[in-house]
Image (cartoon, rainbow, N blue to C red):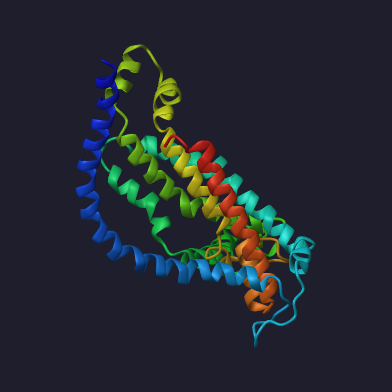
Amino acid sequence: MTDATMTAPSAMASNKTRHKSPTVRRRLPVLLFFLPPALLLFTLFVILPMGEAAWYSLYRWNGYGAPEHFIGLRNFEVLFNNAAFSRALINNGLIILASLLLQVPLAIWLATMLAHKITGVIAFRLIFFLPYVLADVAAGLIWRFVYDGDYGLFAAVAGFFGVATPYVLADKNLAIYAVLAVVIWKYFGFHMMLFIAGLQAVDKNVLEAAEIDGATGWQKFRYVTLPLLGSTVRISVFFAIIGSLQLFDLIMPLTGGGPLNSTQTMVTFLYTYGVTRMQVGLGGAVGVVLFIICITLAFGYKRIFMRHD
């Protein structure tokens, strides 16, 4: 009896091995054909540039010739004592908060309204999704004209009501809030489509059962729909955080990081100081800090909140 029980698992394991080995042999040529080019491209365009940025961050270098003035971690010390970079960190935090507290809830609300098959719903989905399709640079230029205090839409509305025109983008206290409004407008459509896809996977029988039990609309959303959307909410929040840390294309044509560095983000700061002002070592330090923050948040978030997804 004991011998039979001991030999059964080994027999099952050998059977599994025999069944799996042909599959592995069939996949091996595909892996050998596609994996090396992918690894080569990833190494050339991701690994090596990251390594170079980390290496340049140890030098004071303007991009001409070979870096020779080794200064160790001095660039990082200068960076964290720079008021503009501190402002950029705060702005990235504000963008993350606005995305999580305003953009994602707005996307969920609109998705619940547009997930049903009603007349004209496709047109409304298209209208709300169009800002995301629009190029970031184009969106920044459009909203720069809208905010313009001399010729833009704000100036026209203020002139119609006979009030003083607000120069929003020229005010260091208001410019960041103008940027936040554009960020929410630009990207909420992407999250809305994620939630619409998630809502279409929700079992309608569960909602009908809750309705039969007397649940109100809010109760159905709070206790049925939202828990079933848990994985979609988590991936939406993940995209919102990582996208907020990498925000660049929208801000440069809109404010250029001004006025007085009040709308800088970490990426615009890197471009302004590392590329425009040719402080390549300082720009490399910004890249290293941004990489560490993104990797820490990405892996930490996935390990804590998405480990079961």
> Furthest residue to the top?
213
**From what the image shows, is residue 229 above or below residue 210?**
below
Q: Nearer the viewer, residue 70 or 162?
A: 70
**For residue 116, side relative to residue 250 (left or right):** left
Q: Quadrant of residue 54?
A: bottom right
Task: Name the quadrant of the C terminus.
Answer: top left
Q: Quadrant of residue 155?
A: bottom right
- Residue 265 appears in the rendering: no
Q: Residue 110: image x %, image y %?
A: 41, 39
**For residue 137, side relative to residue 255 (left or right):** left
- Residue found 24% across the figure and 61% down from its top: 29
Q: What count of labels does the image hold?
A: 0
Q: Quadrant of residue 263?
A: bottom right
Q: Residue 15: image x %, image y %?
A: 21, 36
- Residue found 63% across the figure and 54% down from its top: 92
Q: Nearer the viewer, residue 137 or 203?
A: 203
- Residue 10 appears in the rendering: yes
Q: Residue 129: image x %, image y %?
A: 38, 52
**From what the image shows, is residue 162 above or below residue 110?**
below
- Residue found 64% across the figure and 71% down from its top: 55
Task: Name the quadrant of the N terminus.
Answer: top left
**For residue 141, side relative to residue 290 (left or right):** left
Q: Nearer the viewer, residue 57 or 283?
A: 57
Q: Residue 78: image x %, image y %?
A: 78, 66
- Residue found 35% across the figure and 69% down from its top: 37
> Furthest residue to the bottom?
65
**From what the image shows, is residue 73 above or below residue 11?**
below
**For residue 275, side relative to residue 18 (left or right):** right
